[in-house]
Image: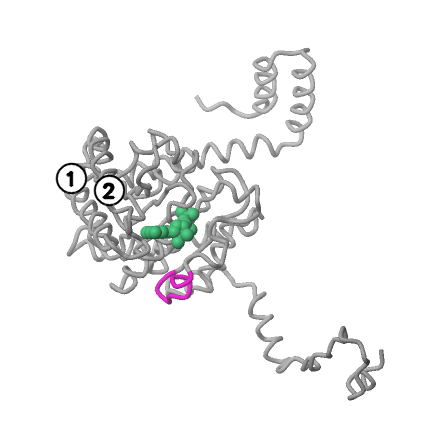
Amino acid sequence: MDKGKKNSNTFPASALHVMDGIEQPGQINEEALRKLKARKHKVYTAEELIAGILSGNRTLLSKAITLVESSLPKHQEQAQEIIAACLQIQNAKCKMQNSEISQAESPLSSIRVGITGVPGVGKSTFIEALGKHLTAKGHKLAVLAIDPSSSRSKGSILGDKTRMEELSVDPNAFIRPSPSAGSLGGVARKTRETILLCEAAGFDVIFIETVGVGQSETTVHSMVDFFLLLMLAGAGDELQGIKRGIIEMADAIVINKADGDNVQKAKSARVEYANALHLFPPPGSGWIPVADICSARSMLGIDHVWEIIVEHRETTTKTGFFQKRRMEQSRQVLFETIEDGLRNHFFSRKEIAHLLAKSEYEIMTGHVNPYKAAQELLEQYFTGSEVVK
Ligand code: GDP
């Protein structure tokens, strides 16, 4: 329809007539838009990213994390360069400070806290509440996630913008959704590297969130100093989908939603869990896991949860367990990285891919047994390679 005619005052008699909206203005400033786009797509050198991270620049930190998460060999190479440089500079700073204070007391040594619990227990509300408490105290908080469902849904538990609304605009908080692709092992490696970058950027408290439904808790436990399990009162362990093994890993169990009619139930649950937890003190740590209650909604007990985490840090630093746990985790990273590298190298070889497809078919049709097939594949892989004696 002709525009001039539509905008005229001669309305058709029909009640269904739709008024035209106003005409859209053109782009206000084409030049500004072009610059913005150019900045967004600018490729930074590793040196620029390292300098950016060390100066606490969150945009450059995000870009470096994107490299860590990328599977492109070129990006991986750059990511490793950045991580190595950040670690080297951090270590040098730590050594300088160590002449006066111990490493665990050093402000450069962050606290890494794993937070788990079934969907709906209140993890994001809790992280928002505790996070705001911490940034108000002057801490810098990074919130990362390990989300086993994200590779399937291509979404992420932290990708939803409505979660942690206040924290996501807090200048002292940095929220990064879970890397969305790859195996749990791959996601774990990326998260570990992301922790290092966040620490280099000055974040002294790192939260790693995961959904309490599977193997990811063990993974998160293997990269944190303190493991916190959020629970609800009045629902049995089975109902909450929490396995006994996860309770055994917890440094503290906090029963959330202790508000309104729920307070008494939460208090009873605390006694029950406190009894259960006394059975599982981590050997040599000097720490006896605690049970507590809180309300993320009303902020009740949130400050006390932080006091527990700080007390754990002090106790385990004195017993040497804090450092031992981190060293043990580093040792684990060494083995996991080697295993990952070997697996990737094995599966990326053309002749193996070909043989593997053949062996799979032969196994499925009952022509060969899997042990023999695996043996042959390994022999083929090692042919020509020197065996280390
Ligand atoms: P998540 O799935 O574990 O991250 O849980 P959410 O933080 O999204 O919370 C799930 C629901 O529980 C939301 O409706 C929250 O408002 C509510 N919730 C969270 N914490 C509390 C609390 O301390 N008290 C009450 N009454 N409700 C809460």
Asked whether the viewer can see residue 194, the reply is no
Foreground residue among 210 and 138: 210
The amino acid type found where label 2 is placed reads Gln
Identify the residue position indicated by label 1 in the image.
319
Tell me the residue at 17%/55% (across/down).
Answer: 99
Magenta stretch holds residue 170: yes
Asked if the magenta segment contains residue 136, the reply would be no
Please state if 9 lies on the left or on the right of 208 as rendered: right
Give, as a single range, the part of the protein colored magenta: 165-173
> Relative to 47, is 148 above or below?
above
Residue in view at x 70 percent, y 14 percent: 365
Find disc 2 in the rendering and name its residue: 323
Task: Specify the quadrant that holds the C terminus.
Answer: top left
Q: Secondary structure at mark 2?
A: helix
Q: Is residue 60 above or below residue 344?
A: below
Residue 49 placement (x, y as % from top left): 46, 62
10 Å crowding of disc 1: few (<14), some (14-19), many (20+): some
